[in-house]
């Protein structure tokens, strides 16, 4: 049952464990009942700090699986694993393979994201009964943190199941809300973000808890609100609401500047080599074998310009690598160590969202934003047409290269009905069917619908 796993994950966060591996999800003892009741009804401020720390830590659980799901289906890279052929069969739709609703790549990230979302929901409840009590401003700050993170986690699950929807209402684990469709789910996520923004706007100047170093620059109510608005902008883009997108960007941390630091500014998952902590799951050593490696899709190298600095996101191997009929010459190299941070959202995405918000109503502004990205990449100003269709093509191209490996390509191609433009690597023949490009993941079997 999905809620049993959620309770287990939340139980770890409640006890203040700052790290949790994917294996731990299944191995933790049953922490249901008294533990959760105690944290909700009779917690100390130390308990709340531990809970927040656990939530931020749990956001990283199964993160690598999520990125492999969207990155492989989006044809950004191949994931070779000699011990698990499903990365190249199921995810790429090899022959008659289909996505499985009861295996690690479906249930793993789904359960982990709901576990964190439930922890955030518990945070909002628990702050009402602490001893000593929080001030109303302090409560608002904690509510804003909890609601924003809950919304973000729900959004990642919706990215997977798309029209299959999600359970947006998880406030009562004994009576979960129903699955709702894609549009309703986005509306529910936006509403949660709006509510969190209201809380953050009335939270004073400081939080009552410490956040991880991934929130450096976003660790006060005012700056965390900018993060909230940035996520809201992404949601508005998924909704196709360009007016709302513009409004959210205005209140976010968008900066129309293009130094490397400006583009990288944002909120990050952080990792360390400390004993028991998690390391960056997207890192493999250069020239790793088929035992475990991510290999850039050949089209990335073919399509990106020779002088484009974003070629540095991949690295040429000492020799080609082949697995399951797929070959590549370049390793995925977005992260060069196993403790590099991974962005949740950063300014380079916001600049491209700004271009998207303006590509119909104000093409001049859209081109200005596009040129910031192009010039930062060393490829010069945009010289193409300025019709909405032409600008959208350019925006999607720049998103492809600027946000490579960050979990956007598949979703972008889907939201603009362009999945058919993604390459088919194994075309089949005879009784062998060509690869498929999946639209969405099935609802996990653990949901017992």
Image: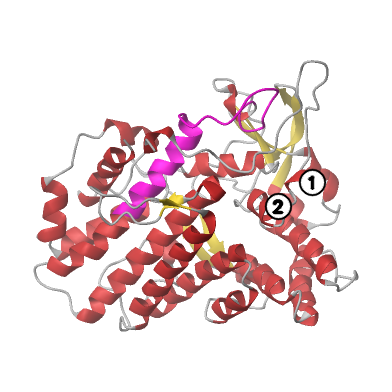
Task: Looking at the image, tell me whether mark 1 or mark 2 is earlier in sequence order.
Answer: 2
Q: Residues within 10 Å of mark 1 (few under 14, many from 20)?
A: few
Packing grade of label 2 (10 A; few <14, some 14-19, many >=20) is: some
Does the CB distance between marks 1 and 2 fall below 8 Å?
yes
Q: Based on the picture, tell me whether residue 110 belongs to the magenta stretch.
A: yes
- Where residue 223 sits in the image (x, y, percent)? 44, 77
Q: Which quarter of the figure has residue 305?
A: bottom right
Find disc 1 in the rendering and name its residue: 421
Please state which of residues 349 and 293 is positioned toward the viewer in this rendering: 349
Residue at x 79%, y 72% (from the top left corner): 371
Image quadrant holding the C terminus, namely top left
Residue 20 figure quarter: top left
Q: Residue furthest top?
A: 431
Secondary structure beneath label 2: helix
Q: Is residue 356 left or right of residue 29?
A: right
Q: Nearer the viewer, residue 215 or 352?
A: 352
Image: 56 above or below 86:
below
Residue 341 forms part of the magenta stretch: no
Q: What residue do we see at 51% from left, 66% from top?
A: 231
Q: Which residue is mark 2?
A: 413
Closer to the camera, 130 or 341? 130
Query: Can residue 320 be seen in the rendering of this structure?
Result: no
- Could you say where residue 127 lies in the image, as x and y percent from the top left? 19, 67
- Image side of residue 387 versus residue 242, left or right: right
What numbered label is drawn on residue 24?
A: none
Q: Which residues are magenta?
A: 89-118
Above-or-below relation of 173 to 87: below
- On the rendered image, what quadrant is the N terminus found in? top left
Residue 183 shows in the view: yes
How far apart marks 1 and 2 lie (CA) works out to 8 Å
**In the image, 419: left or right of 144?**
right
């Amino acid at each position: 049952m999905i809620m049993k796993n959620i309770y287990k994950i939340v139980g770890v966060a409640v006890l203040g464990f700052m790290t949790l591996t994917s294996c731990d999800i299944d191995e933790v003892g049953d922490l249901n009942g008294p533990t959760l009741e105690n944290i909700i009804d009779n917690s100390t401020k130390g308990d709340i700090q531990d809970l927040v720390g656990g939530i931020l830590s749990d956001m990283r659980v199964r993160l690598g699986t999520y990125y492999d799901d969207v990155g492989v289906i989006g044809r950004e890279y191949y994931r070779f694993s000699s011990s698990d052929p499903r990365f190249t069969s199921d995810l790429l739709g090899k022959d008659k393979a289909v996505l499985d609703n009861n295996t690690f790549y479906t249930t793993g990230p789904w359960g982990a994201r709901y576990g964190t979302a439930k922890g955030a929901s518990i945070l909002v409840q628990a702050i009402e009964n602490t001893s000593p009590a929080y001030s109303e401003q302090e409560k608002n700050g904690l509510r804003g943190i909890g609601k924003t993170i809950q919304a973000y986690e729900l959004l990642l699950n919706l990215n997977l199941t798309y029209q299959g929807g999600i359970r947006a209402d998880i406030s009562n684990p004994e009576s979960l809300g129903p699955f709702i469709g894609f549009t309703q789910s986005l509306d529910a996520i936006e509403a949660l973000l709006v509510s969190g923004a209201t809380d953050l706007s009335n939270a004073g100047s400081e939080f009552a808890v410490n956040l991880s170093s991934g929130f450096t620059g976003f660790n006060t109510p005012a700056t965390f609100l900018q993060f909230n608005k940035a996520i809201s902008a992404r949601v508005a883009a998924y909704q196709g609401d360009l007016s709302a997108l513009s409004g959210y960007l205005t209140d976010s941390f968008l900066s129309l500047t293009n130094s490397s630091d400006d583009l990288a500014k944002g909120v990050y998952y952080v990792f360390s080599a400390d004993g028991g902590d998690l390391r960056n799951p997207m890192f493999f050593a250069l020239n790793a074998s088929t035992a475990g490696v991510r290999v850039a899709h050949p089209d990335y190298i073919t399509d990106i310009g020779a002088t484009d600095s974003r070629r540095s996101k991949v690295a040429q191997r000492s020799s080609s690598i082949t697995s399951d009929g797929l070959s590549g010459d370049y390793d995925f190299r977005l992260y060069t160590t196993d403790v590099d941070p991974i962005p949740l959202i950063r300014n380079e995405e916001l600049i491209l969202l700004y271009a998207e918000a303006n590509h119909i109503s104000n093409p001049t502004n859209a081109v200005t934003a596009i040129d910031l990205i192009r010039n930062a990449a060393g490829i010069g100003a945009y010289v193409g047409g300025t019709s909405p269709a032409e600008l959208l093509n350019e925006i999607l191209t720049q998103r492809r290269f600027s946000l490579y490996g960050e979990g956007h390509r598949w979703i972008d191609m889907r939201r603009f009905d362009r999945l058919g433009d993604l390459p088919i690597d194994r075309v089949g023949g005879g009784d062998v069917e060509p690869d498929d490009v999946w639209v969405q993941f099935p609802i996990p079997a653990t949901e017992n619908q």
